[in-house]
Each structure stands twice: as structure tokens, then as C-alpha cells.
Image (tube, rainbow, N blue to C red):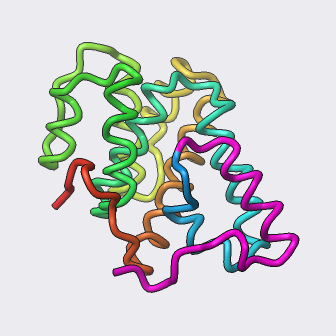
Amino acid sequence: MARVDEVRRESLDARQQQLYDDIMRTRPRGKLSGPFSVWMHTPDIAEPANALANCFRVHARLDKRLIELITLLMCRAGTVKYAWAVHEPLARQAGLSPQIVDAIRASKQPEFSREDERLIYDLVTELLTTKTLSDGTFAQATAAFGRDGVIEAVSCAGFYAMAGFVLNAFEVPPSPGGEVLT
């Protein structure tokens, strides 16, 4: 059971209703859910969080498959059940192989056939482990993705860490029917 009540548009003030409409415009679900069901109570956080989320969801420079790989790695690292249930099917739709998804779910290092996926995996796992990037990892990632791609990858990992903290702290449950992360 979530620690915040379901957000109902009619109970929001005018600013929150506008923000609710803006958020729902880019999301396929019929109701406000996930971290936005928490952030909506603080519009000064919800508004920039929505803009940042859309950088990764709608306007990413990196391939969607790589954004979803980053997201799954962050979900696994934080055992973020809600976000895993949402992003696991999105990762598969974006072209991430079932073997990679299953390995991440099992907290195992996947076998990669694509170099860009291996580089993203190395970048994110190094950030999670050391909280920084070695010169070698940074140089490899920059050569493959460019400066802006590395900025996007690191920022995406940070965004999903923040979302994961919110989802876990406020005990936002996954939607019924999604893959369960334990």
C-alpha cells in the first residue's frame, strides 16, 4: 500500500491540474502513477522532474534500448519494483534481449553481443560501485557516445536513482500484471 493517496485530478489546484495534464500527455497509462503520484504533491519538484524524464523518454540522444538498459540497471540496484514492472516490457520493446533482461533481474552480468550495451553496463555498474568513472571507462564511453551521450547516460542513471528512492520510500506498488522484481 502506497504511503500517499491516489492523485485525483479534480482534487488538485489549478497549477497541479495543468501539471497533471502535461504529465499525462506523454504517458500511456490512464491515471497518474509512479513517482509522479508522489511528486505531484510538490509541484516545484514534479514540474522539473517531468521535464527531465521527458529528456530520457521522448528526446533522448542515446538509443531507447540504451536508456532502458540504464533504467533496468538502476531498478535492479535499488530493487525498485514499480519502475521495473513499467520498464521491463519497454526494454524488450526497445530491443534489449530477453537474456540481458533476465541476467539483470538475477543480478548477474549479462553476455553482450553489442558493444554499446556493454559500455553502458560498464559505465552504470562502475558509477554504482565507485560513485565515479575511471579514466578508461570515461574515455571509452566518450569515444562511443560523445560528451553529450555520456552526460545523458550519467544523468539518466541519476534520475532513475532519484525516482527509485521516491518509489521505494513511499512504497508505490507495481501495477498488477507486471513482471515482479524481488
Where is residue 3 drawn, in percent x and y?
44, 85
Q: Percent from the top left, x then y, of residue 135?
A: 48, 38
Q: Quadrant of residue 131?
A: bottom left
Out of 85 and 123, give the one closest to the viewer: 85
Instruction: Name the spot of residue 119 as percent of width and height, x first.
Output: 38, 27
Q: Horizontal placement of 53 versus 43: left or right?
A: left
Q: Residue at x 60, y 73 (%)?
A: 7
Magenta region: 1-28
Residue 150 position in % (x across, y down): 58, 34
Quarter of the image with the C terminus in it: bottom left
Residue projecting furthest to the bottom: 3
Q: Which residue is drawn at the image coordinates 44% and 43% (left, top)?
A: 134
Farthest residue toward the right?
14
Q: Quadrant of the N terminus?
A: bottom left
Residue 17 location, quadrant: bottom right
Q: Residue at x 51, y 82 (%)?
A: 5
Residue 176 in the magenta stretch? The answer is no
Measuring 55% from the left and 58% from the top, which residue is drawn there?
31
